[in-house]
Amino acid sequence: MDFDNSKPIYLQIVDFFYENILAKRWHEEERIPSVREVAVMVEVNPNTAIRAFNYLQEQNVIYNKRGIGYFVSENGFNKVLDIKKIEFMEVILPDVFKKMRLLNVQFDEVKNSFDQYVNNIDHEKK
Amino acid sequence: MIQIDNIRFYYPNSKVILNNVSLHFTTGNIYGLFGKNGEGKSTLMKIMTGLLFPKAGYCRILNENTFKRSVKCLQDVFIVPEEFELPGVKISTYERVNSTFYPEFSKDQFYKLIKEFKLSIDQKISTLSFGQKKKVLIAFGIATNTRLLLMDEPTNGLDIPSKSQFRKIMASSVDQGKCIVISTHQVRDLHSLINHVVILDNSNVTFDQPLSTISEYLWFGKPNQDDRASIIYSETSYGGKAVLMRKDHDETEVDLELLFNAVISQPDQINAILKNMYHDERV
């Protein structure tokens, strides 16, 4: 895994989990790789991996079955979706707004490109 | 696991390189030992394994002095030195001869690691390149399953894909019963593995903190105008990064190179911040 320097590694591992859950590579109520397996996969100290697991447990995205391993929670998919949505609204959007003001981009222009983007995707699907 | 008390060391007819060094290494951690060239990192490792004797002070592993070189002590320690000589025999012969000294040695694990490093046990060690020899020694060191594993510049001489393999292997071989100490200048190769930083400077330990404490109290990155006041250390180059007091900033990953430079230039200030924070919390 390539780490970006600004974010703590454990949170980048959390993102890696979110991605797998959102992409439905890891399903609800299914066992996920162990702490050690994740540590080896992303080449980090197992202590760092444990931090990511603890964080995800606090968020109720995964849970631990004693002696068996970690599982994606019953409604883990929706939980991740909510978390990522909040992150989008509170972190990514303000950044976009800041750039829009700086570059004097009008809202209509953004709306047009968004509509076009949605159109293109719908076309591709057909 | 290993307790170092007030160690003093100098080579004949030269200046003191370790003066009153005290350190404590515990199991379950991977320590990064850093310091400028000639600051005594390798010397300290040699003292820890009983290869050199301190002029004063003690180094104990599980309450045994390392300079006594007792069997009990030595069978639980392995060092991968930076420079080494290996006999010109087959890898399998090397394993057979040397593994008997380590009661916890796992032949399966060794063979697996040799394979992972793209070597074969029938190869003669004298025909291998420096990097390949190093891999043999790293694989052997991990397979000994000693509680203390010391590595001096382990990634020197490893090719690019092997560095990633090395990290994977290290991540899989740490456990709560093991203590690993790695000395390196290749900070980028290993920063995701290390969870405790020890820095030697001016013949002494100038810094000794777990990464979790560092990232709790220090912030690494490009500062804003408002942050000017809390800058502890900054790089002079344009857009240079800086070390700040974290306060209410989001947690960032510890930039080990930046931390090292900051500690070398402002040791007292950084240590004071990490210590004061402790007091604040406890009051």
Image (spheres, coloured by chain):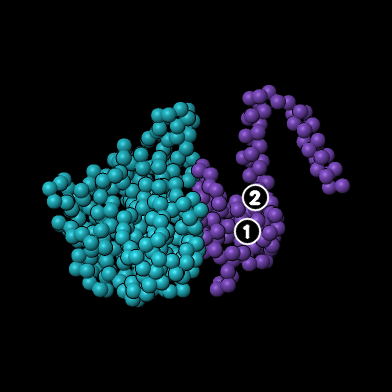
Q: Position of residue B62 (x, y in %)?
A: 27, 69
**Residue, disc 1:** A61
Q: Nearer the viewer, residue B96 or B40?
A: B96
Q: Residue at x 63, y 25 (%)?
A: A102
Q: Secondary structure at mark 1?
A: loop
- Circle 2/circle 1 CB separation < 8 Å: yes
Res A52 quadrant in image: bottom right
Chain of the residue displaying label 1: A
Name the residue rendered at 37%, 35% in the picture.
Answer: B232
Q: Residue at x 28, y 51 (%)?
A: B41
Please tell me whether mark 2 sits on a helix, a strand or a loop.
helix
**Relative height, residue B185 to residue B23 (above, below):** above
The hue in which chain A appears in the rendered picture of the protein: purple
Q: Which mark is residue B130?
A: none
* Colour for chain B in the figure: cyan
Q: Is residue A17 visible?
A: yes
Q: Between residue B165 and residue B262, name the one nearer to us.
A: B165
| Callout 1 crowding tier (Cα within 10 Å): few <14, some 14–19, many ≥20 | many
What is the x, y in percent for residue B263? 33, 41
Q: Amino acid at mark 1?
A: Val
Q: Nearer the viewer, residue A61 or B33?
A: B33
The amino acid marked with disc number 2 is: Ile
What residue does disc 2 label?
A83
Residue A37, percent from left and from top: 54, 63
